[in-house]
Image (cartoon, coloured by chain):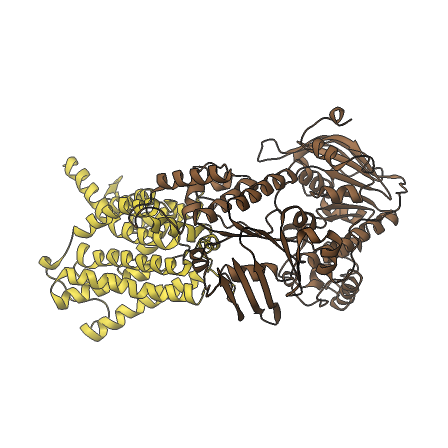
Chain colours: A yellow, B brown
Amino acid sequence: MNEIFKLSLIFSTIRLSTPLLLAALGGLYSERAGVINIALEGLMLAGAFTAAAVTHYAGNPWIGLLAGILAGMAVASIHAVACIRYKADQVVSGTAINILMIGVPALLSGAFFLSSGSTPQIPKDNLIPWTPVVIAFLLVPLTWYVLYRTPFGLRLRAVGENPGAADAAGVSVNGMRYAAVLLSGALAGIGGAYLSIGQSSLFTRNMTSGRGFIALAALIFGKWRPVQTMLACLLFGFTEAISIQLQGVKVGGEEIPNQFIQIIPYVLTIVVLAGFIGQARAPRALGMPYQKER
Amino acid sequence: MLELREITKRFGDVLANDRVSVVVEPGTIHAIVGENGAGKSTAMRIAYGFYTADGGEIVVDGEVRKIATPHDAIALGIGMVHQHFMLVDTMTVAENIVLGAEPGSAATLDLQKAAREIGALSDEFKLSVDPEAMVENLSVGQQQRVELLKALYRHARLLILDEPTAVLTPQEVEEFFIILRRMREQGKTVVIITHKLSEVLAISDEVTVMRDGRVVGRVKTSETNAAELARMMVGRDVLLRVEKPDARAGRTVLSVKRLTVVVRSGGERGLRDVSFDVRAGEIVGIAGVEGNGQTELVEALAGLVHASQTSGAIEFEGRDITRTDARTRHELGIAHIPEDRHRRGLLLDFDLSENSILGVHYREPAVSRSPMLDTAAIRVRALELIKDFDVRPANPDLPARALSGGNQQKLIIGREFGLPPKLLLVSQPTRGVDIGAIEFIHRKLVGLRDEGCAILLVSAELEEVTALSDRLLVIHHGRIVAEVDPKQTTNEEIGLLMTGGSKANVE
């Protein structure tokens, strides 16, 4: 009994970490290139809704996943154009996208499915419960390699640290930043798709419930490095898994109120973001649009 | 090799380059001189594709070329080293050098191959630097070598160097010139942007002089001299030497006793057991290679170092001020012209009126009748300051950022002179300031001295401290190692003391 409890806790941790990890790695590309991506939450919602809706119509989760990726990239491109082309404040742009993506899926599901809350149930055979998990964890070494062992990664990091230097060296700062933000949309899109057609079988309103922000916290906690970020995601996934396991557990004859258990991951997020755990150094040009004199 | 034809460039209302034509012969060192704001950097940034010209054309190797981005310039064999280095601090030397021109395929970054190629270039041009080192851990001189290697790695045949010596110590300048000559021997062409005439004469083959966005002359270096170049740059005769009567030193104003400053970041830096006096009506100069305790000394005297980091005593007019704060010292009559005017001297986004009252912003004359700022009085006073200290453009509503370095400096000097000071602490008064303004600032300092103010002068320009000072203290590793009479001592002797040679060796 105890053995099963442990094993299921491990699986549950991995499954719950997966959407965080996908979104956090997406955020990593964007932020290492110098663009703050607070829009991860909205990008995940776009991916989750689109994946569920398309899977429902196409009857094929792979087409749904692809659609989720494209939706994440499409919404990310709004953020990219606003921040890179028009040099908008990156936090404001990201926040606007998050608010927008609370409304848009509700509107669309109202139009297509006559329900403002959710998409229709998808049959069990059309779900992909494990593929995104594998993708997420394979992306960790891949991201490390791309970041530290390819010209693309070198340019990406340079653009996030000192865009002026990258420009002087003949690197297209804006080109790199567009690529990075779109990549981040794609990964957050997979993360969202996993929520709707992997972990559950339909899209429900605001189903990310803050996972985009927790992913952001994991990214910062992981000091913007792939492996550390994965460990941070596993920690957050673990606390979430624990909080599920703890439901209904009695302490001294009294059941712990559910609300207290559910706040655990969020409390941890605040603790991490408040900087209790070491000082992280962000990419130096993070949040700063590159203004070239003309 | 490179020719700019009738290049014109506007920034808003400012005509930065007005039909600028420059011809750079291959295999030469070509100097472009002019005061700050003359348009030297703008012209060269156009050649490197950083700016796009509004008119004119660029000719490389006899062909008209379009250079829209640095990438285009690099492809044509043009490299540029900017005044503020364009390096990513958190990356290694090798990563910085290959950035944007990486060896290997798109899938792999071959840093070993890069290190080998960098090694070969280092040997060829005697530019030794460790490819594995982090850029943030390098000295400024080493960082400059990385910038040069970066251009050479991209097969630059023409190197444009923007104010390359501004950040170097006199010794590093010597080494740097040797490197430039070696590059010329290897067939490279060098364009060096500067406003230091001694360097132009020492290193260049030809000189193009710019003033107010136009080219005003082109001469062979062998056929000109400093006075002629200065006249072309400024448009009038310039006194290159400081003329001053002997000092009539009065009572002791500042007395520093066994002052020690500990630097929190640790290491060798700081100030150790320094004692000296400054009397009314004299200029005491501090000569030394930068980073030998000058900053700590001046900031400790100005009250900008926390008392817990210092020991010893500072007396001002016989009163112990060791534990007083910066405001109290300012009220007593100690003015401070800081070495870094952007960090300590100005609020760049505030207008000139607002900047002109910093330090007295809480009292007369900024605040007089009511608790509010007396904006009318401030403006009148700012206009006076602008007129007396020849700050241009003479508009008190402009943000300080809009001024050239020399004019920003004149604004700070005017403000501090208006205290009026009994003791003036002045660091690097003419750093990044053009020669017309240098002459003006030097005359103002001597004038203040003759009115009976005590002045402590710190400058990295040896010629400046020796010309202005009545007494000269040499600082090395945080200690005063010698006091010399600047009239009796040669720059070579002082240079030796600055680098740790003993006085006995000099005598």
Residue drawn 53% across the image and 49% down it: B85
Residue A98 vs residue B353: left or right? Answer: left
On-image quarter of the C terminus of chain B: top right
Instruction: Count the marks.
Output: 0
Residue A140, x across and y down, in percent: 27, 46
Which of B383 and B216 lies nearest the eye of the viewer? B216
Q: Nearer the viewer, residue A220 or A31?
A: A31
Say which residue appears at 22% left-offset and 75% top-offset. A111
Q: Is residue B319 above or below residue B201?
A: above
Name the residue located 50 percent from the left edge and 41 percent from the top edge: B136
The answer to which quarter of the image holds residue A77 is: bottom left
Viewer-proximal residue, B177 or A32? B177
Q: Is residue A265 left or right of residue A62?
A: right
Quadrant of residue B329 within the rendered picture: top right
Residue B486: quarter of image: top right
In x, y percent, where is residue B75? 42, 56
Image side of residue A101 versus residue B291, left or right = left
**Residue A235 or residue B452, whichever sits in front:** B452
List x then y, in percent, for residue A207.
Answer: 26, 60
